[in-house]
Amino acid sequence: MSIARINNNINAINANRNLDVTGRSMQKSIERLSSGLRINRAGDDAAGMTVVTRIRSQVRGLDRAIMNAQDGVNLINVAEGALDEMTSRLDRIRVLAVQAANTGVNDLQARQAIQDEVFQSIDEITRIANTTKFGTNHLLNGDFGSSAEIKPGQDGVQNFGINIDQGPSSSTLENGQHFLNIVKTKNGFSQLIPGLDSNGVTRTMHAGIQNSTDIAVTLARFASTAGLNGTAGTSALQIGDGGIFNTVSIQDGDLISFEGVLSDGVTKFSGTVSASNITFLGDSTQTAASETSLLGAINLAIDQAEMSLWGVNSAASAPTSFRTTVTLAANTSDNRGRLLLVSDLETANQSSLNLRLVRNNFVVTKADGVTRSGAIGINSVLSGGGQIGNAVTAITGSTFGTGNFSIDVEDVQGAQTRTIDSTIQFQDHAGVNIRRDVSLASSLRGLQLNGTFVDSLYTGGSSISIGDTITLRGTEADGTTFVAAYTISGSASTDTVFNDFQFATLSGLIAELNYRTRDYTVAGMDGDLSRFETGVVTITPEGKLRLLDDLGRDNSQLSFTLTYNSRPTAGINQTFTIQDKGDLVKEGFAESATFRINGGSAVRAKAGDVITLYGAEATVDGAVQEQITFRVGNNLKVGKDILEVNASEYVGSLNGGPKVTFQNGAQDVVFIDDGSFTSGVARTLMVDFDTILDITKSSTDEPDPGTTIIISAVNKSVNFHIGAFAFDSFRTTLGDLTSQNLGFGRGSGRTVEDIDVTTYEGANEALKIVDEALDQINRTRSLLGAATNRLEGTISNLSVSSENLTAAESRLRDADIARESTEFAKNQILLQSGVSVLAQANFLPQSFLSLLG
């Protein structure tokens, strides 16, 4: 390049360009040294800026998550402190319950004082639950609870015996639907085997269970004024003119309503029949198919209930073991007019029937319940009935494992009918006691009472005169009372008319006392009842009147008083009165015994009772106590029966999660899903299974193995966001821990709020409730403790992550000061050199001016 030209100073341009490059380098060095950052703008490192920005956001998120976790620990500490005080209150209630159970020392007033303190602790528990807050959030009143339930509308699911536990922390499922699949993997059975008798030889069923049809007898009695308990033949239930329900005449327009329970012990049926549409309910041509008859209407309602229960189109298609029909008792003497529920029942459940007579929307009279006592009435036994339905295999709800278990039957007490005898003996004129087998049809005019001539001036040889009266004051088995007055007649024809309160013979007197269909609107006294509805009057071989409880019920109050008044004879104004007070000879009670299984708690039960026996252990592998339910039979004997059990087994899984093996009756079974339905986070569901678990599908059923149940979940549990990105969180449930919910569940009548220690039974029940409540609170505290540990671990982990990410950001973004200082020094030198060279380059063209000179 020549330097002899002056139009373009190429050297100066070159020096200026290099000086510009040095200046820009100098500017970057100054920027990096002054900011300490290698990347100050995207142009410094485009890819690096992207990575650094992401790391910086993540670090800031982690720092906030650390603060969230610290706040979560603080929240849990608040809840933990409240739960600790609630535990103290429950412990105090438990101590008070133990004190109150000592009834031998603490009288009612002392127990009431204890109860007053219990109330204070209960109120404090509720106050703590309702007022414990973190900020404005309530922690223990259910605001942060979660719940799950079986989705309604699934055919038959509600009858399978599956119950979603509604206790605190029982579900952590996310909102929405989830799927619980249950497969039956092993078929089981339970049956009672007769044990050995006291000699160790003969096999006999000590619990009285045998294969028999269940026949329930209504306490209601229909009849007619045409005769004692209805006329002979088929018209025992004549409704209309002369028809009677218990003691009340049925009038045109009356309604007979009924309601009952099928032989499954659960399904209800009901209906109403207009009495004006019914003629003869006892007529077999009417009852077989007529919907206008009472029997026909009841049977129709039963058929409809059975069809609905089993999902069939006809009652005949329902399982025969649960078929129930209504018929009439045998049309004989004391039994006329009773209805029978006949069930082909060989399980521990039982049917029942209630009847009411309604007039102008008012219940005139009612008869609730049935009896299975066998003999009904003194003269006969109901046709095929009054018996307890049972079977050797009548076992429900067995939760015992596979094996043989001993059922002990002890302290057997035979049945006894309540018996009341008069204090007066009927004797003839010679003072000889009346013989029941030959003298009942004789006129009363030939009798005397306890050797006393009631009318001593009567010259006909009799102590009782025509016109004398007998006043009956009676108490029914249920405690209701009545009064009736009867007059001695001279004509035996009065014995066949049962609405005039007259009689001539001893048999006529007994018939009047036994007359159960008196119309109180006509013949009663001041509207009172005028008969024994549940009692039978007869005469003993000793000549005394005897009153027997017709149904042989426990705690019967059946009793009577008779007052004999002698009418004054002509010319004599003197009267004689003899008071007869019925004496209790035998108290009535049903056949009973004490039962226990495998050394468990003893249960006292009567024949026909449905009882549950528990094993000796309180819990088995954390589940509820082993138990078995059956109905006690008749003819109880002291000895041992054998319960043979081959337990069923089931396997369940939630949302395809881990499989859980269990058997019927298992409680607090926890299922865990696989996380695919909950954004990768595993959730749990706690389930209780009934002792009767109706799951029949097995793993080989195609195309759908097992039974799948849809679960609807609502999750309001407290959420802790402990990460820098979406869904970096976990939940924990705080539940409803008020006194209304602690214990065995709201609405069960067995919660902390329901505790009453004023009775021995209540104090023992309180101990069970408090123990369950403590378990619930301890479970919640355990979950909170686990959450605290997790949050503290999270804080440590997030701190390390934040530190490492910050270091990574520093390595990418921060300036290397040593290097940048060296670069800065180099650029300074280059800048000075460049400036000097540029000056020299600008000076060179001036040297050519000398040539012009």
Image: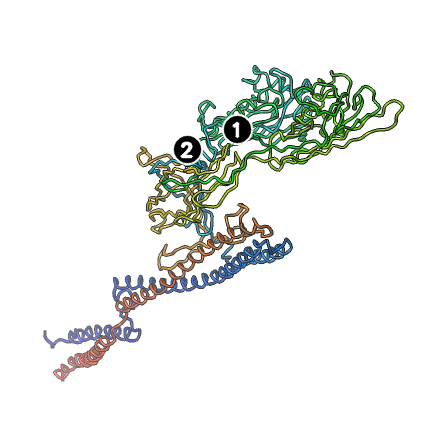
Q: x, y (%) of residue 336?
A: 61, 22
The residue lying toward the viewer, choosing from 472 and 779, is 472
Say what amino acid the circle numbered 2 marks.
Answer: Arg
Q: Residue furthest left?
A: 1
* Distance of label 1 from label 2 (alpha carbons): 23 Å
Q: Which mark is residue 203?
A: 2
Q: Locate the N terminus and report the quarter of the image it occupies.
A: bottom left
Q: Is residue 158 left or right of residue 327?
A: left
Residue carrying label 1: 387
Residue 263 x, y percent position in the rendering: 50, 30
Q: Residue at x 35, y 57 (%)?
A: 725
Judging depth in this view, the residue of 572 and 644 nearest the camera is 572
| Residue 733, quarter of picture | bottom left
> Disc 1 or disc 2, which is closer to the eye?
2
Quick check: can you spot residue 131? Answer: no
Examine the image and state in which quarter residue 470 appears.
top right
Visual colour scheme: rainbow
Disc sitting over residue 525 in the figure? none
**Pointer 1 local density, CA inside 10 Å: few below 14, some 14–19, many at least 20:** many
Question: How many residues crowd mark 2 within 10 Å: few (<14), some (14–19), many (20+)?
Answer: some
> Hey, what amino acid is under mark 1?
Gln
Left/right of residue 151 with respect to residue 427 in the rendered view: left
The relative height of residue 630 versus residue 2 in the rendered view (above or below) is: above
Q: From the top left corner, tell me how far across and down residue 415 is, in percent.
A: 56, 34
Q: Quadrant of the C terminus?
A: bottom left
The location of residue 188, given as percent across then percent down, is 36, 36
Mark 1 vs 2: CB contact within 8 A: no
